[in-house]
């Protein structure tokens, strides 16, 4: 039987690292995507091989960098969902990253997407209604698994199809 693959959005924070580890513990092959813009982590583009090797050695995570700089600059000009704290277009940025991740699924042989989002953790972008908007507008409805709060959400396609064991996810 072939091992299932998931694309995990990796910010480098604890929640996304935990999400990678949870997927690996469920025997899911993880392809982590780290998005970079002129405002965050752009320096990694100059040392991608070193960064990838360090993440693999330190966390056992295969990371790919994805430059969304141009799209992000355009998004900043007029974010459909407005700005969060510190002029940050949280919702639109998530939609952009998930849209790009979804577009890369076939290239990486991925069956679904994963984020480290936690329901209720962020006042603008991690409310139940906002999570649904992000899924819908990114085209990721039913493909997006949030393992740190899955028990609080409706089962997704990967859970219903048995690609991951819902009982081993968190609430």
Image (cartoon, grey):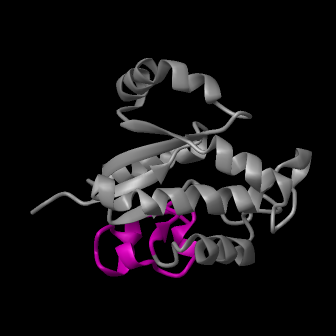
Quadrant for residue 35, please give it: top right
Q: Quadrant of the C terminus?
A: bottom right
Residue that appears at 46% across and 63% down: 102
- The percent position of residue 71, horizontal first and vertical second, equals 66, 51
Q: Is residue 65 above or below residue 29?
A: above
In the image, what residue occupies the spot 42% across and 37% down?
63
- Magenta residues? 143-171
Furthest residue in direction left, as rendered: 1
Q: Residue at x 45, y 77 (%)?
A: 156
- Asked whether the viewer can see residue 121, the reply is no
Left or right, 60 with reference to 75: left
Q: Pick the residue in front: 118 or 141.
A: 141
15 left or right, relative to 84 = left
Please state which of residues 89 and 10 is positioned toward the viewer in this rendering.
89
Residue 56 forms part of the magenta stretch: no
- Pinpoint residue 6: horizontal percent, then vertical percent: 36, 57
Image vertical order of residue 58 relative to residue 15, above or below? above
Quarter of image, res 5: bottom left
| Coordinates of residue 42 in the picture (x, y in percent) | 63, 29
Figure disc tally: 0
Extreme residue in the right direction: 86
Is 132 located above or below residue 65 in the figure? below
Please indicate whether residue 157 sits to the left or right of residue 154 in the image.
left
Residue 84 visible at all = yes
* Residue sitting at x 61%, y 22%: 43
In which quadrant is the N terminus drawn?
bottom left
The answer to whether residue 156 is magenta is yes
Drawn side of residue 50 relative to residue 121, left or right: left
Q: Quadrant of residue 92?
A: bottom right
Residue 56: x and y in percent read 36, 28
């Amino acid at each position: 039987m072939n091992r299932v693959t998931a694309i995990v959005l990796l910010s480098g924070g604890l929640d996304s690292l935990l999400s990678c580890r949870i997927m690996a513990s469920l025997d899911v092959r993880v392809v982590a995507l780290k998005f970079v813009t002129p405002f965050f982590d752009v320096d990694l583009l100059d040392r991608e091989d070193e960064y990838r090797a360090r993440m693999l050695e330190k966390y056992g995570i295969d990371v790919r960098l994805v430059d969304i700089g141009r799209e992000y600059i355009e998004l900043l000009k007029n974010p459909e969902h407005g700005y969060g704290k510190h002029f940050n277009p949280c919702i639109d940025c998530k939609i952009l990253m998930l849209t790009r991740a979804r577009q890369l699924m076939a290239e990486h042989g991925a069956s679904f997407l994963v984020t480290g989002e936690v329901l209720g953790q962020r006042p603008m972008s991690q409310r139940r209604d906002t999570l649904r908007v992000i899924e819908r507008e990114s085209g990721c409805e039913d493909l997006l698994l949030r393992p740190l709060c899955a028990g609080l959400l409706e089962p997704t396609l990967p859970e219903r199809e048995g690609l991951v064991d819902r009982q081993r996810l968190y609430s």
